[in-house]
Amino acid sequence: MRVLISAGPTREHLDPVRYLSNGSSGKMGYALAAAAAQRGWEVNLVSGPVTLEAPAGVTLTAVVSAQEMYDACRSRFSACDAFIAVAAVADFRPKFRFDHKETKAETDSVLELEPTVDILKSLGQQRRDSQVLVGFAAETGDLEQKAPAKLIAKGCDWIVGNDISAPGVGMEADANFVTLWNRAGRVGSFGPMPKSEIADWLLDQIFGQA
């Protein structure tokens, strides 16, 4: 089994110092990479900026922006059996990037943005029939509606939803509570548990116990 996993946030720079990003720690993606490697699978991990070390047996590619993450994933996508898109990719980037840090007086109070590449949807349009696509939906409400809708919109086989507004779980926490859907509907929920145990449960549900 050859698995490609994206993890962590992206940073969309306004200038060499300032950027748009989010609070993703990368812990869930790294836990999945570790669990997959422990099963003897070949794991490529494409990660945005985090403070985590690559799990043993995992090939790590470090990136910064959404475009860099897309380029790294695209170049590895055709060789994988499954793509697990855990990364919290920024939806927008500054329309203009400055090559120096502007002073406050120089900075315009209106920041123009443009969409970043939709990595999961774009790769889904390039998939082989035999490839498995797994997406993640981190929401602050209406999870039962938003996660299945994202599964359809992105062309996924599976979608993992988690409510990041719940206390003690989510993007920066060590634990998570997830609900899993496939194309047939809701599969089940698991947690709150450490992300390492969440990772094993997800791999068991999606790929079977190994």
Image (cartoon, grey):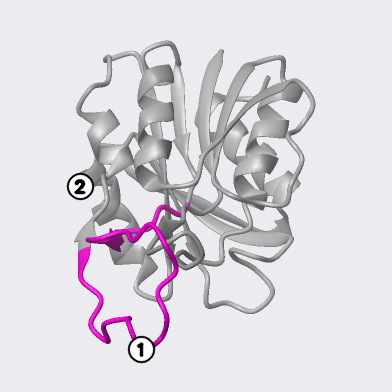
Residue 38 vertical placement versus 180 (above, below):
above
Q: Quadrant of residue 107?
A: bottom left
Task: Give the foreground label among 1 and 2.
Answer: 1
Specify the quadrant that holds the C terminus. top right
- Neighbours of disc 2 within 10 Å: few (<14), some (14-19), many (20+): few
Q: Which mark is residue 204?
A: none
Q: 142 or 59, which is in the foreground?
A: 59
The alpha-carbon separation of the residues under discs 1 and 2 comes to: 42 Å
Q: Position of residue 193 (x, y in %)?
A: 73, 58
Q: Quadrant of residue 172?
A: bottom right
Q: Quadrant of residue 173?
A: bottom right
Magenta segment, principal secondary structure?
loop
Q: Earlier in the sequence, mark 1 or mark 2?
A: 1
Residue 76 vertical placement versus 125 (above, below):
above
Kindly identify which residue carries mark 2.
153
Q: 66 or 159, which is in the foreground?
A: 66
Going 64% across and 37% down the picture, which residue do you hit? 32
Q: Amino acid at mark 1?
A: Ala
Q: Secondary structure at mark 1?
A: loop
Q: Amino acid at mark 2?
A: Ala
- Please report the bounds of the magenta region as a residue range: 88-113
Going 54% across and 46% down the picture, which residue do you hit? 48
For the residues bearing labels 1 and 2, Cβ distance under 8 angstroms? no
Kindly identify which residue carries mark 1.
105
**Left or right placement of residue 139 versus residue 149 in this view:** right
Q: Position of residue 2 (x, y in %)?
A: 54, 15
